[in-house]
Image (spheres, grey):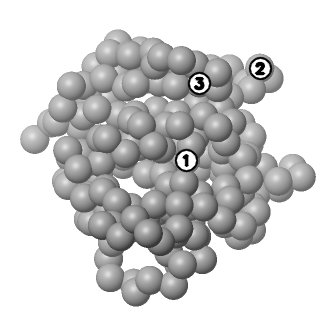
Amino acid sequence: MAMPVQRTDIGWTAEMARALPDDGNRYEVLDGELFVTPTPSTPHQRALRVLCDLLAPYVNANQFGELFWSPADIEFSPKRLVQPDLFVAALVDGKRPRAWADVKHLLLAIEALSPTTARADRHKKRRIYMKEAVDDYWIVDVDARVVERWQKGDERPEVLAVTLTWQPALSVAPLLIDLEEYFDEVWRE
């Protein structure tokens, strides 16, 4: 459940969150608040796996960054530690990042919604990703079969149900994702 821990008198830091026990939960610090997320559902994980399968060949072929998935501690500041479900980290001086501490810029961050994470993903995390100049932020709503796409400077999301186009650099051809096929694959039995 992506919800803040009840103690609000503590200003949580990334260091404090990393000191918590390895109990299977994901811990994030969103502007000083600790958020705890338990194991995701099967549709959530399938949605991310299918997206990973679509993104990996494109990212690998164009070599502009590296595709990762959680758990991964991305620390924007001591009060901002996030674990995007999937993300593409920018290269660091033309090379792949060697440690999470090297990841300072995300070309893409993706969160798949669940009933317990929707509020944090749509509000707190979105604000953080936009303030941290994440180029693209996709909120995958598996149940509604749409992707809410936020880009730097957006005040409202682009809600996509047919095609999602991603072009992280002008020097590469865009990736086109057929969202109807994507969601059909996620829900196929």
The structure residue drawn at horizontal position 60% and vertical position 61%, both measured from the top left corner, is: 79
Q: Quadrant of the N terminus?
A: bottom left
Question: How far is disc 3 from disc 1 in space, using C-alphas?
Answer: 14 Å
CA distance for labels 2 and 3: 15 Å
Separation (CA) of disc 1 from disc 2: 19 Å
- Where is mark 3, residue-wise? 151
- Between 83 and 155, the one nearer to me in the picture: 155
Mark carried by residue 87: 1
For label 1, the crowd category at 10 Å Cα-Cα, with few meaning under 14, some 14 to 19 and many 20 or more, is many
Q: Which numbered disc, 1 or 2, marks the residue that appears first in the sequence?
A: 1
Query: Mark 3 or mark 1: which comes first in sequence?
Result: 1
Q: Amino acid at mark 3?
A: Gln
Q: Nearer the viewer, mark 3 or mark 1?
A: 3
Mark 3 Cα shell of 10 Å, populated few (<14), some (14-19), many (≥20): some
Task: Give the left or right position of residue 113, taking residue 55 as reference.
Answer: left
Which of 90 and 83 lies nearest the eye of the viewer?
83
Residue 15 in percent (x, y) is at: 60, 77
Instruction: Examine the image and state in which quarter residue 121 appears.
Output: top left
Residue 31: give x, y in percent of width and height. Answer: 54, 54
Does residue 47 show up?
no
Q: SS at mark 2?
A: loop
